[in-house]
Amino acid sequence: MLRQLAMDVGLILWIFIWVKISGWVDYLISLLAVPPRAIGELMASMESGMESAADTVGGAPAIGSTIRAPFDYLAGGFGSLGEYAFSAAHGIEVVAMVVAIVVFILPVGFMMSKWLPERLDFWRNSGKAKKLVRAGNGMRLFALRAMATAPLLELAKISPDPMGAWLDGDEAVVRKLAMLELNKDGYSLPADMKPKRSSWRHKRLTSGTVVDD
C-alpha cells in the first residue's frame, strides 16, 4: 500500500514538474515571436500613416490621383510586410505550443506507462482477493499464506500457536491471519466481513461491571 501511495504521489509530482517545464519551454520559444510581432505592429502603423497621407494629397484638384499613387504603393508595401511579420510571429507561437506539448507528453506518457499497468493489476488483484475471501475456505487460504510468508514476530502477536489455531478452526485467529496477509498487499476485507468493534458499554457489561443508566 505504501508503495502504491508513493507511486501515486510520485506521478502527481512528476506531472506537476513537467507542466512547469513545458510552460517554460513555451514561454522561451514564444519570446522569439516578439521581434516579428513588433515589426508587424510598426508596419501596420506605417501603413495607416501612408494611407492617411494618400487621402490627404489625393484631395488636391486635378493632380490628386497622380500624387497619391506613391503613397498607396508604400501603404501596400508596409501592409504586406506587416502581414508577413505577424504570420511569422504566429508560426513561432504555434511551434512553441507544439514543442511544449511534446515536452510534456513524452516524459508523462512514459511514467504513465509504468504506473497504469501496476495500478490496474492492483485493482484486478484486489477484486480477485475479495472473491477468494468470500469463497468457502477463502479466509483459511489467506491465513495459511500468512503463516507461510509473514514474519514470526507478527504471527506471535496474533497467537502463540497460529498453526494449531488454524487446524482447530479458530475463527478469530484465522480472520486476523487473513487480514495480515491481505493488508501486506494493500488489500482489505470486504466491509461486511470485517470484525465488528465492541462498544465501551458492551465491554464493561461483558466484563461483569454493572453500568448504571
Image (tube, rainbow, N blue to C red):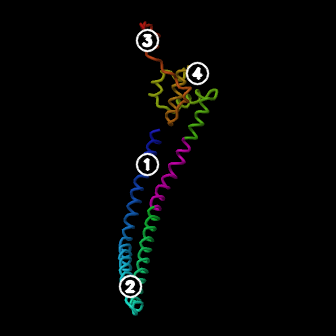
Numbered-mark total: 4
- The crowding category of the residue bearing disc 2, from other C-alpha atoms within 10 Å (few below 14, some 14 to 19, many at least 20), is many
Looking at the image, do the residues carrying marks 1 and 3 touch, with CB atoms under 8 Å apart?
A: no
What residue does disc 4 label? 167
Give the label, 2 or 1, closer to the camera: 2
N-term mark: 3 or 2: 2
Whether label 2 touches label 4, CB < 8 Å: no
For discs 3 and 2, the disc positioned in front in the rendered view:
2
Circle 3 Cα neighbour tier, 10 Å, few/some/many (<14 / 14–19 / ≥20): few
Q: Residue furthest right?
A: 136
* Up/down of 128 relative to 143, above or below: below
Q: Marks 4 and 3: CB-CB under 8 Å?
A: no
The magenta stretch spans which residues?
101-122
Q: Secondary structure at mark 4?
A: helix
Amino acid type of the residue tagged 2 in the rendering = Ala
- Residue found farthest to the front: 61
**As drawn, is 100 to the left or to the right of 193?**
left
Query: Compared to 172, does 94 lie above or below?
Result: below
Magenta stretch, main secondary structure, is: helix
Which residue was labeled with disc 2?
54
The residue positioned 49% from the left and 34% from the top of the image is 184
Q: Are marks 2 and 1 in contact (CB under 8 Å)?
A: no
| Residue pointed to by mark 1 | 12
Q: What distance separates the C-alpha of mark 4 from that of mark 1?
A: 46 Å
Q: CA distance from mark 2 to mark 4?
A: 106 Å
Q: Amino acid at mark 3?
A: Arg
Which residue carries the number 3 mark? 204
Q: Specify the quadrant that holds the C terminus.
A: top left
In three-dimensional space, the C-alpha distance between marks 3 and 2, rounded to whole angstroms, equals 103 Å
Precedes in sequence: disc 4 or disc 1: 1
